[in-house]
Each structure stands twice: as structure tokens, then as C-alpha cells.
Image (cartoon, rainbow, N blue to C red):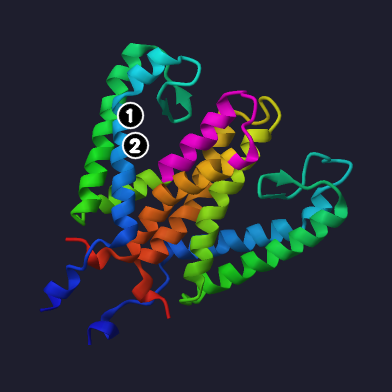
Amino acid sequence: MANQDSRAPRGWFLTLMTVLFVLLAISDFTKAIQFAHDPAVGGLVILGHKFHGVAHNLVLGPLFGLILFAYAFGIWNMRTWVLPLSIAYAFYVPANMVLFWSLHQLSPPTVRFIVIYLIFSLTGSVGTAIYLAYHRARLT
Amino acid sequence: MAEAEVSTSRGWFLTVMAVLFVLLAISDFAKPIQFGPPNPEAGIVEFGHKFHGIMPNLILGVMFGILFLVYAYGLWNMRAWVLPIAIAYAFYVPYNVALFNTNHEEAAYSLVFTVVWLAIALTGSVGTAIYLAYNRQRLR
């Protein structure tokens, strides 16, 4: 009985996050195409380093795409193993952002862009990890 | 019975974090002293903006110092009300750092400094929030 109760539904937040992670995975799978189309903007960023060249993006894009697909699958099915993945991702995303802006001397984007970007990226990474940790009893 | 078995001990991680937050509070209280002729680059950074001048540092330093002391008190005593503070802080730190880094002067900080700083900052903010969310049944 208690076991049945613990199998609570995913809820709207995790459903939305799953959809967004699938979209992010698709985006990562197409990094090579994005880079070929516009090398100035396209390219995968890992640990603050932007990868240039179609080959790099062709290899690393699908690799990260697969991780994100696995993450989305884990959230959708409320699996226990998704929690460590979410925690790692919660640390990775802010580190990646800060390192990227530290290593690249780019003209700063508008504050509005940064704020909107931060809302999405931090909710998806930090927010999802905290949510999953809080509701860990619902994971199976 | 099961409730009684739940440990309410703080553990080493939260003990370290509580001590670090007290140190952070002391640092914030001392912001107006840090800011001055020997170290004109010092100053409190809030919402990505570095505040110069003794008065802004005095007001904001004391304000954030008190907030950190409250946070440390909540952690030390394992209070349930500390969780919302931890969650807000987990979002605030990456937001603050990312926003600050988009506008910083060229090569302001070395890569090693940035990585070490990120490790400490993200563990203290994101790590503490996830830890508390995961162990919420230990809060009272």
C-alpha cells in the first residue's frame, strides 16, 4: 500500500523539464549542422570551452545528446538513478556558464538576454536537482 | 517509530557549511573596511554588480552579513525554515557569478582561481540546497 502511494505521478514541472531536455538533446545532436551553418554562433560549449570544427561537434554533440536523452528518460520514468545525474548537471551548468564567460572575452549580451537565459538554465539544472532530491521518495 | 529513527544530527557537511557561512557573514560585515585605498578593487558584488564606495558596502555588507548569520543559524540548528533560504541562495549564487562574469574586465581572474572559487561557491550554494532537500526529514 505504502509502495503504491510512493509511486506518485511525475507532475507538471518534471514533465516540462523532460520535454526541454529532449529539445536540448536534439539541439546537441544537430550541433555540427548548426556550426557549419554559422561558425560564429554555433558550436558546443563544454566546461567553458567552445568547440570549433564540424568533426568536434559531430562527435561531442551526439555524446552529450545521448546523456541528455538518458536524463530525460530517467525523469520521465521517475528512476532513482536520475538523481546523481541531476546533481552532477546542477553543478555542471553554472560552472560551464561562468567558465565560458570567463574564458571568452566577448561583448556582453544584453542583461535581458542573460537573465532569461539564466532563468531557463538554472531552473533546468539546479531547480530539477533540488526538486528530485526533495521528492526522492517518488523515484523508483 | 520510523519518525523517531530519523537522525536529526547535522553531520560534517552541514557543520562545515555553517562555519563557512559564518566566515562569509564576517567577511560581508567587514566589506566597508576591505574597501579602501589599499584595496580599491574590493567591494560587495550583488546581482552581478560590484558596489564601490563605503556607504553601499556598509549597508549591503551588513544586510547580507545578517542574512548569512541567519542561514548559518538555521543550518546549525537544522531548522525547517532554512530550506527555502537554501533554495533561493542556490539560484542566487550562479546568477550573481554569471552576471558578474559577463561584465568583468579582461583576464581579471586566472583559470585556477575561477575553478577553485566555483567549486567552493557551488558546493556552498547548490550543494547545500540539494543536501537539505534530500535530507529534509532531518529538519525540524
* Amino acid under disc 1: Asp
Residue of label 1: A28
Q: Assess disc 1: are there few (<14), some (14-19) or many (≥20) residues with their C-alpha within 10 Å of its C-alpha.
A: many
Q: Quadrant of residue A12?
A: bottom left
Identify the residue at horizontal 28%, vertical 54% (top origin). A15
Q: Quadrant of residue B69?
A: bottom right
Tag of residue A61: none
Q: Nearer the viewer, residue A29 or A71?
A: A29
Residue of label 2: A24
What subunit carries mark 2?
A
Disc 1 + disc 2, Cβ < 8 Å: yes
Compared with A61, B66 (above or below) is: below
Compared with A2, B107 (above or below) is: above
Where residue A113 appears, x then y in whole percent? 57, 38
Where residue A10 appears, x then y in whole percent? 25, 61
Where residue A60 appears, x then y in whole percent? 31, 23
Q: Is residue A99 magenta?
A: yes
**Judging from the image, what secondary structure is the residue with disc 1 in?**
helix
Identify the residue at horizontal 14%, vertical 77% (top origin). A2
* Amino acid under disc 2: Leu
Q: Is residue A107 magenta?
A: yes
What subunit carries mark 1?
A
The magenta span reads A91-112
Q: CA distance from mark 1 to mark 2?
A: 6 Å
